[in-house]
Amino acid sequence: MIIMVLFTVFVPKVACTNWKRVMIVLSQNLKAPDGAPYLDPLDIPYKIIHNHTVHKTFNKLWRRFGHYSRPLMHHKLKNYTKFLFVRDPFVRLISAFRDKFVKPDEYFYSHYGSTMLQRYANISKPPDSAKEAFAAGIRLSFTHFIKYLLDPQTEEENPFNEHWQQMYRLCHPCQIEYDFVGKLETLDDDTEHLLKILGLNNYIHFPPGYENRTAVDWEGEWFANISVADRRKLYNLYETDYKLFEYDKPETLLDE
Ligand SMILES: *[C@@H]1O[C@H](CO)[C@@H](O)[C@H](O)[C@H]1NC(C)=O
Ligand SMILES: *[C@@H]1O[C@H](CO)[C@@H](O)[C@H](O)[C@H]1NC(C)=O
Ligand SMILES: *[C@@H]1O[C@H](CO)[C@@H](O)[C@H](O)[C@H]1NC(C)=O
Ligand SMILES: *[C@@H]1O[C@H](CO)[C@@H](O)[C@H](O)[C@H]1NC(C)=O
Ligand SMILES: *[C@@H]1O[C@H](CO)[C@@H](O)[C@H](O)[C@H]1NC(C)=O
């Protein structure tokens, strides 16, 4: 097998898990309990994929190495294949909300959820843990989450978390010449294409698994409780992602 070195760039929640599996197989440096490297991406246990050591986004690498090691970055960016997968911006937000706040997630609760409850749900002392909040029937709504994104105070305090940070800010598409930009909406075709570019299509089969739900009325249900004024503000916040990655403006949500 020709060893090809990849420099991967993930947009969180954009087929991240499956690509991480593929990268782990390619890098051959993670061994199964029997000591052999994993050969099939699907054999890698989910908890390993989400190990934070393994989970390194480009942004983290960039922050870590970008400043004091520009020549190294330059070398890598020149010689490695760079790809990026993007997703419809509003659908990506819904997905982030569903993933991080609909089930108890202690990290997201303590870093973000409890602040959102305080500020937007009028709960002055939210429970200490996600477990306790859920037990007490306290749930963050999608409306609270959107309010948090629209509140100028949010970004003044800290940069957006990578799961809702605008994709263009996360992936520096204007500074980095990507070899390939795929879309989650056409994941199967785009993956096949990418694996061909990488010369890996005979070696690797990308695990299927993308839930096939892109319907606009589904988006409509999620945004039902968000005012049109707020939807428009939200669109403005993510407009660059819509334009740069060529997603249709969600007109039906925005005019009323
Ligand atoms: C995460 O991965 C690193 C390196 O492979 C390992 O040392 C560490 O124990 C792992 N952590 C967990 C929680 O599995
Ligand atoms: C790319 O790799 C080649 C061969 O390893 C090396 O000679 C070259 O300097 C690298 N390019 C950059 C920009 O570092
Ligand atoms: C917020 O809660 C306080 C006390 O719990 C209550 O007095 C106040 O009316 C609430 N405000 C809103 C907007 O619900
Ligand atoms: C996904 O949806 C598209 C459009 O409705 C359809 O053509 C395609 O067959 C679906 N794929 C799967 C795997 O269900
Ligand atoms: C919208 O509000 C209704 C009534 O409060 C609630 O039952 C529903 O779950 C909300 N929808 C979303 C997507 O948050």
Image (cartoon, rainbow, N blue to C red):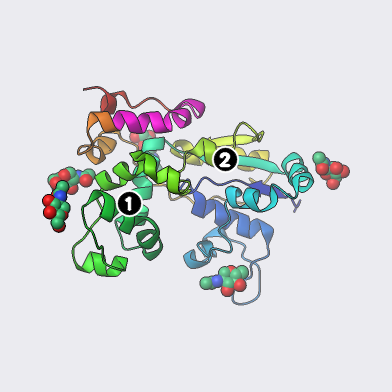
Going from N to C along the chain, the mark reached first, 2 or 1, is 1
The kind of residue tagged 1 is Arg
Q: Residue at x 58, y 64 (%)?
A: 53
Answer with left or right where residue 55 lies relative to residue 166: right
Residue 238 colored in magenta in the image? yes
Decide: is 96 above or below 234. Answer: below
SS at mark 2 in the image: helix
Residue 68 pos. (x, y %): 74, 50
| Magenta-drawn stretch, dominant element (helix, strand or loop) | helix
> On the image, numbered disc 1 is attached to which residue?
98
- Give the magenta range: 231-246
Graded by Cα atoms within 10 Å as few (under 14), some (14 to 19) or many (20 or more), the crowding at tag 1 reads few
- Res. 232 image quadrant: top left
Per the image, the residue denoted by label 2 is: 171
Residue 115 horizontal/vertical position (percent): 33, 55
Q: Is residue 192 above or below residue 60?
A: above
